Image: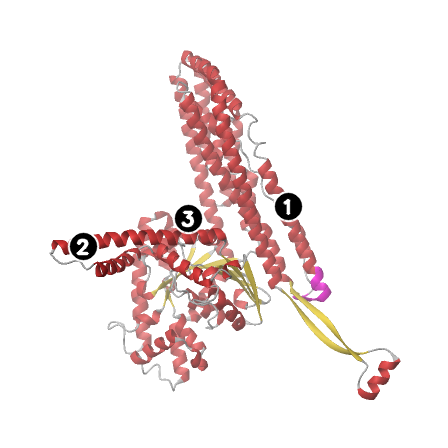
Amino acid sequence: MNTNDVLSLNQRMHDWIQAYDQELEKDIAYFLRKHAVSAPSELEHTFEQLREEGRLLQIGVVGRVKAGKSSLLNALIFGGQNVLPRAATPMTAALTTLTFAGTFSAHVQFYSEADLRDIEGSAQRFQERLAAEQKRAADEMRRRRQHAGQAADEEAIWTAAGHAARRELQKDASLCAAQDQWERIQACGAGARALGAGQKLDAADAAALAELLRDYVGADGRYMPLTKSADIFLPLETLKGIRIIDTPGINDPVRSREQRTEALLKECDAVFIVSPAGQFLSEQDLEVMSRITQKEGVQELVLVASQIDNQLYGSDTCLPTLKASVDKVTGDLREHVVETLQRLTQQHPEMEAIFGSMLQNEKDQVLYTSGMCHSLSARWDEQHSWDASERKVWANLQTHYPDFFAAHDRERCRANLDLLGNTAGLLNVLERVRARKSEIIGQRSADLVRSKASALQELRTDLLAFIQQRSQEIKSADVDDLKAQSRKLDELVTESSFFLADAVAQRISAFRDQLEQQLTKELKNKYDGTKNVFSSNTSEETRRETHKRDSWAAKIANSLWGGGTEERAYRDFTLFWHPVRNALVEFASALVIDLSKISEDVVAEFRRSLIKEVTAVSRTRMENVSTALIIRSVQALVAKIDIPAFTLDSGSLEHLRGVRDTLCDSEAREFLGQASSKLAQLQHQAICQIRNLKGSVHKHLPQSFAEEFFKDMHARIRELEESVDNAVLALDRLRRMAKDLEAV
């Protein structure tokens, strides 16, 4: 199926629903919501959004801590300079995004009080488990010594038990990381915890920015324990049109950071999976692959075997030439990839298109790299700045391949380091991904086609089952029994209404608060991020000039001793307008999508909880009434809760343009003023829609849920009575419905 086929099928399904509106009126809303089937106009709009031009290509980089992600990005983006520090643990790995901008800057976000409470709680659980495990190990040691007839040395036993307990807890990497992080946070002192929500950093160049970032994301940085994420903005050609997301990894110990990682991965069009060559595609890597392809819907995967230099020293890989050794290692890795992808395809047939494409593309099945070797080559003339890890790599290469790394042969050494770094190969793949931007986004459109086609088929299956169930009810129903159920309902109205009203009121109150909180939080995050882009693309400097004063005394003073002058200060204001405008467009489009998704998720959960609660109360109070009728009545009423579509009027942004790439002074201030005004307008629109959505909850529910519930139940019983009285006509109508539906 293509886009037009899905749009056509969706239209035909809605035409069929309209034709049999009388039979479906009470139940169709539930089925449409269950399968997320959109109205024809809404589905067409969704496809149009995917075709939108000017969208940044989102590229994710995922992998375990110490897999070489930072070294890879330093090689690709920063020419081998160590701008992004290497992380030591899952907790010290900050979530990082890299985006093009007019100047070098970064926005660092710190852990919130809620995040700190989560980390502290995990650290406390670590201590509790450690104490319990140490006691268990000590008891076991005493038992063994007693059985062997040996004297118990309590101090030695307790010490040994402590070591054993810590080894056992190492299996829970997340908990151990939280304990390590909490110790680091406490070492920061109370002053560091009062830093606030974030910090903006500005620098003249990449090196200066790297120096600033070390305090926040360096392994031993002063504020590293409190840093949650860093959004970095750079005026580098390699970043034009793309955004790179360097994740701290899946299964993050910090829940709020993992939530943002998941949100960013959902937006990714391509993902580079970085795995150390020595443990290539471990179970953890495979878990990440499955997750981002199945759950996050990412279709473009690139496998990168990092730290290739570590695999060159074994007896089976240390061959006479460096190139032969590299070919041997990469050949072994390719065989491993083929076996792994074939196994994954068998386990997940639905992923055959993705993994099959990777199997066919032999050239790029495995991209190898050594970010460390690239850094050594790029900084060959700065060997005094090599750190201990880099010196160790260099020493190993000289020991095992002396002919290829003779220190006196500068050019040959650098060429062989570049061979191991393979940065050119990685850049080629990055450029191919960039060049295939339209194709990749088109693939995401194809995925939407598949998911919507599947949803429509499942809707048809459910509706056919519904028709069959109705037919069976008519065939098996007894009119006298239905009348008895109707009388029973009349008797229970007063008592049951009280309990139903109380259950519904509690659910609605909690739902409205949750909806407003989550939507407002997302709006604030998006707004703050856009303002940061504004700030990072503006600069203001003070310039001083000396002028002669325009008076006869000043002129005499100037001619006699050079006096009669005054110094004037001027403020030069510059702005790069392209990133500012792009940020506004992205704010509008991304905000609509994200707010809609959040509201849909919260409303869906509210519907599920309300159906469960009301059904439970009703079944308890109305034992003699048909359970199927109760459930369908509740589903029908809850399905009436509708979500007004979020729409932000961003059309006027098309006219927001500068006359040149860099605007100065009055032009820059005017443009920034217009952009800030547009952002404020979009923010106000969103705030109003959030308020309207919260206030509309009661509008989309009956004023008296219990009254409408009993009214609906009575109507369903009457309809069933009429259908039983006219069984031949009713069953014939249902048969025609099923036949027409099968023909859609």
The reply to whether the magenta stretch includes residue 665 is yes
Tag 1: amino acid:
Gln
Relative to 209, is 131 above or below? above
> How far apart in space, not on screen, are marks 3 and 1 (Cα)?
32 Å
In the displayed orientation, state which residue is furthest to the left.
Answer: 149
For mark 2, what is the residue?
142
> How far apart in space, not on screen, are marks 1 and 2 (Cα)?
70 Å
Relative to 369, is 169 above or below? above
In the displayed orientation, state which residue is furthest to the top.
Answer: 480
Chain-order first, disc 3 or disc 1? 3
User: Circle 1 — which element?
Assistant: helix
For mark 1, what is the residue?
685
Tag 3: amino acid:
Lys
> How far apart in space, not on screen, are marks 2 and 3 (Cα)?
49 Å
Question: What residue is at 11 percent from the left and 56 percent from the top?
Answer: 148
- Estimate the x, y position of residue 487 in percent, counting from the top left: 46, 13
- Estimate the x, y position of residue 405 in percent, counting from the top left: 35, 81
Q: Nearer the viewer, residue 447 or 579?
A: 579
For mark 3, what is the residue?
295
Circles 3 and 1, Cβ within 8 Å, touching? The answer is no
- Estimate the x, y position of residue 113 in percent, counting from the top left: 49, 52
User: Circle 2 — which element?
Assistant: helix
Q: Is residue 473 visible?
A: yes
Front of the two marks 3 and 1: 1
Tag 2: amino acid:
Arg
- Estimate the x, y position of residue 40 in percent, counting from the top left: 55, 38
Q: Is residue 593 visible?
A: no
Give the crowd class for mark 1: few <14, some 14-19, many >=20 residues within 10 Å. some
Chain-order first, disc 2 or disc 3? 2
Give the crowd class for mark 2: few <14, some 14-19, many >=20 residues within 10 Å. some
Magenta stretch bounds = 660-670
